[in-house]
Amino acid sequence: MSDEKIMADTSYVEHMFLQVESSDAVCVLNIAGHPYRLRELIFMMIENGCRVMKTTADSYNTFSFDKERVEVYDYLTTIIKAKFL
């Protein structure tokens, strides 16, 4: 499927893992949603001063965290699971 068709398909779901660092926290996000929505989320994080890096499922699964896990399901069907340091 071409990029153009993917972007036009509102049911297409992209999945990625991101390491996000801010001045007071580090987390690894497991996110899924339409590519436009994910780009919007990443842009908002960067705009708010976060450093965002793409990572892998292995990094998510082995990330040392404080045993808190947050799951957010918003009205634009983005799924976010976060592990915080």
Image (tube, rainbow, N blue to C red):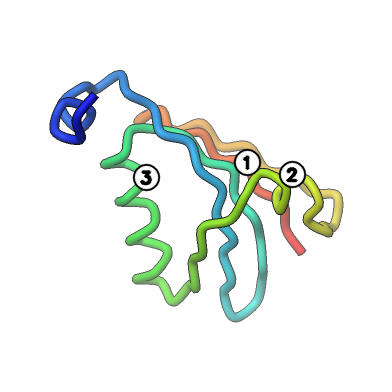
**Label 3 – label 2 distance at C-alpha:** 20 Å
Residue 61's spot in the image, x, y percent? 77, 45
Q: How many marks?
A: 3
At mark 1, the secondary structure is strand
Q: Amino acid at mark 2?
A: Arg
Q: Can you identify the residue that label 1 sits on?
A: 81
Give the Cα distance between marks 1 and 3. Answer: 13 Å
Q: CB under 8 Å between callouts 1 and 2?
A: yes
Q: Which of 25 and 11 lies nearest the eye of the viewer?
A: 11
Looking at marks 1 and 3 on the same chain, the residue that comes earlier in the sequence is marked by 3
What's the amino acid at mark 1?
Lys
Marks 3 and 2, the one that precedes in the sequence: 3
- Nearer to us: label 3 or label 2: 3
What residue does disc 2 label?
69
Residue 11, relative to residue 68: is it above or below?
above
Tell me where residue 17 appears, x and y as whole percent.
56, 48
Label 2 crowd bin: few (<14), some (14–19), many (20+), radius 10 Å: few
- Could you say where residue 30 lies in the image, as x and y percent from the top left? 59, 43
Q: What's the mark number on residue 38?
A: 3
Where's the C terminus, which quadrant? bottom right
Q: Please give the name of the residue rendered at 21% of the width and 22% of the height, measured from the top-left corner.
A: 9
Dot 2 falls on a residue whose secondary structure is strand
Q: Is residue 81 left or right of residue 42?
A: right
Which quadrant of the rendered structure holds the N terminus?
top left
Of callouts 1 and 2, the N-terminal one: 2
> What secondary structure is found at the residue carrying circle 3?
helix
The residue depicted at 33 percent of the width and 61 percent of the height is 43
